[in-house]
Image (cartoon, rainbow, N blue to C red):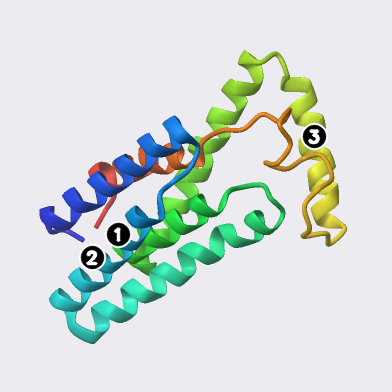
Amino acid sequence: MANPVIKIFILASVTAAGIWDLRYRRIPNWLIVLTVLLSLSWHSFHDGLSGLWTSSLGLIVGLAFLFPIYLMRGIGAGDVKLMGALGAAVTFKHIFTLFVISAIIAGIMAIFQAIWSKALLKTVKNMGRLGKHVLLGRLKPHAELNIDNDHALKIPFGVSVTFATWLFVFFGRQ
């Protein structure tokens, strides 16, 4: 991923997604499809079948990271698709790193939001309840702790992915 053209494309795509998520709390499908198609094409053109394979595998792995959380309604479908699209862009070799950085930034954002909303203790208790829910093997949405609850604190995960991608592109070892 050392080529500056693919880096510019990835940054433009993820920045648009982050802005869209922050403003409208959704990520448009056309942006996801465009990112996936251009990423698959780019890697195929530059590395042939090997590039198509690593990009396709990145797409699948990126989707797989967030899909269980989506099933529990802890995250929206646009966020899952964005991580898949970025997997196609950065390939399976780098999507785990990007996912971890995104999760850390999302966690920091959530802590600040809980503090700002004066709900830190309640949030910690809810995380414990949610952890227990998962440990009991329940991958269905929790009755209260999900993104459909209008009273739940929510962060735009696409924004954390945007910051993570910028950090990854500028400071990552590619």
Q: Position of residue 2 (x, y in %)?
A: 16, 58
* Label 1 residue SS: helix
- Assign a secondary structure to mark 3: helix
Residue nearest the viewer, comparing 144 with 6: 144
Q: Which residue was labeled with disc 1? A: 35
Q: Residue at x 18, y 69 (%)?
A: 42
Q: Give the percent coordinates (x, y) of residue 129.
A: 84, 41
Give coordinates of residue 56: x percent, y percent: 36, 75
Give the mark, 1 or 3, whose residue is nearer the N terminus. 1
Q: Please tell me which of labels 3 and 2 falls first in the chain.
A: 2
User: Residue 38, labelled with which disc?
Assistant: 2
Find residue 126 and name its label.
3
| Cα separation between marks 3 and 2 | 40 Å
Question: Is residue 100 visible in the rendered structure shown here?
Answer: yes
Between the C-alphas of marks 1 and 2, the distance is 5 Å
What amino acid type is highlighted by mark number 1?
A: Thr
- For the residue marked with disc 2, what is the amino acid? Leu
Relative placement, left or right, of 40 versus 109 is: left
Write down the quadrant of residue 47 in the picture. bottom left
